Amino acid sequence: MTFDETLHVYSFLPGLSDARMLVISDMEEPFVPLSPETLCVDVQAPNVRAQMQQLLTQTLPYLFSEAASDDSAGNAALKVATSLLGLRGGGHVIMFHATLPNRGLGALRNRDDIRLYGTPEEPSLWAPQQPAFFEDMAVDVIAKGVAVSCFLAPMTGTYIDVASLSVLPRRTGGDICFYPSFDLSRDGEKLHYDIARTAAQSAVYSVVFKLRVSRGLSVDSVYATWEPDVVDRSSFQISRLSNDATVDFVMSHTERMEGAKNWYAQAACLYTDVHGRRLIRVHTLTLPVTTSLSNIFRYTEIDTVTNLLIKQAALAQISGAGRFKEHLQKACVDMMHSYRINCASTTAAGQLILPESLKLLPLYVGSILKMPAFRQGSDVRADERVACLVRLLGLPIALTGPLVYPRVLPLAKGGQMPERVGLPTHVGENVHLPSTVACSVDRFATDGMYLIDNGVSMHLYLMAEMSPEFLWKTFEVGTLLEVPAAFSRLEVGKGSGEAEDYSTRLLRVIQQIRSDRGRQPWIPFTVIVPGTPQEPKLLSLLCEDRLAGELNYVDFLCHIHKLVQHKLD
């Protein structure tokens, strides 16, 4: 299906060389024009595949090569698509938007107002428009087992209302992929891999999930990308659950667990697979019970604690509850205070005592406050903020550390690459990576080249005093401004072990990082040089520095120390 100010539905009939296009012009009461059996076909069938290839490669590019209007009936098209799959028994709708759906059923208006940024009225931009329309749609699609994913790729300066268009994906378990200021040369590769992952990844449908726990504990809250149709806090129902989905359950004590040696949790998931079979999967976990606070702190997992704190803050922010900053600081102070009075030595009065397992917690909390989702000011637009908040609500444990504290890998200094960096380790296809440096611009040499990796993107940052000889040897250009375009022409050389083959060594480092996160979504790569519009966004990733009114790491650590000391007094 395609749409502009009208809706176009394509049917694939035997004996034809081209797909047949039906136009629906009534966007206030759109309807499914043909039976599901006619519109829902097997694209692997030879006659259908030939028509589909003809449609995608020739017909559609010709029809929409010169779009005469910016009007979009996207939500009317969404209504027809979900109704069609509902008649079919459920499925997955993948929507693509480049402009705001401003026409017909569920039309949205451009409400972005930079004057509201940083004011008490800003959360109104994060609430969805047309709440009745989206709520009715959500109830209907969940009942029918239909999920919705959205790909949002607005041009520079275009408002697309991520807050509204993300409602159905969040309610149904779909994906939300946002590409601000979309540029095909920069974002095309990422878009390609995201579409492939969403369409082909393992997923189940019409899911009913239940978490059961031992007596004495209960599920207090649940955090996930989606807004589940909650039966109770330990159960939810959702249209789609993919292998990228992450959900956090928070348990609380309801009674004393005297004499218990083990604690049990059992997750039961009832679902329909892609073959239409109704199945159930059960996982049971056993954990030892302890009454020792020292053991609790000894075995605490910092990434799990940080993951939960991020999601609590993101949910408070996106719901407009506010005070997330105070909650994060209070959680950090409470943990440090509890350790200080219950586990630490009494001879260390006046010092900030950090448990070994949580020694990075103040650093991580200070970094969270500087993320685009939480930063104050007008440099983060409403669409980008909501997209970041939604992504944080579904953040997996594996990406928590690098997203909160990006890795900074020095790849060049003084016109030379570090010894062995990018050369084979002779263990599989691995190569040597450099030792990381602190995530602060103060650690950057003025003639250095650095790779910043935060788990969801990679950036190659070339400093202003890079030597022309190194630029020519690596990129075959003479100036910094030529590097971004030259990078796309680099190829891994045949003699990968040659010490002077800097371009090959650089590419192999990038490949190594992507290979290490093979199960995660594709990591895009950009080259950034000083003086370009991308530089401030890159510098905002350096979380040990002062940013947007937030303290640098040392000052924030001193601030936490004072709060802990005040609580002790």
Image (tube, rainbow, N blue to C red):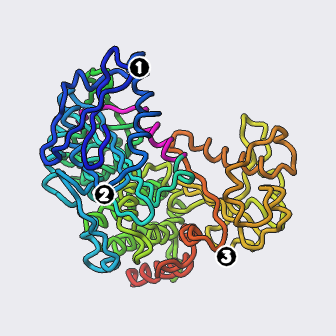
Lower position in the chain sequence, tag 3 or tag 2: 2
Residue 430, position as x, y percentages in the image: 72, 40
Q: What residue is shown at x 71% (from left), y 70% (from top)?
A: 463
- Cα separation between marks 3 and 2: 42 Å
Q: Which residues are magenta?
A: 189-212
- Neighbour tally class for label 1: few under 14, some 14-19, many 20 plus, Cα within 10 Å: few
Q: Amino acid at mark 1?
A: Gln
Asked if labels 2 and 3 touch by Cβ distance under 8 angstroms, the answer is no
The secondary element bearing badge 3 is classed as helix
| Location of mark 1 (residue) | 44
Quadrant in which the N terminus is drawn: top left
Residue 428, position as x, y percentages in the image: 72, 34
Image position of 72 (left or right of 401): left
Residue 329, position as x, y percentages in the image: 39, 73
Image position of 561 (left or right of 434): left
Q: What residue is shown at x 61% (from left), y 57% (from top)?
A: 526
| Location of mark 3 (residue) | 442
Say if the magenta span includes residue 198. yes
Q: What residue is shown at x 70% (from left), y 66% (from top)?
A: 481
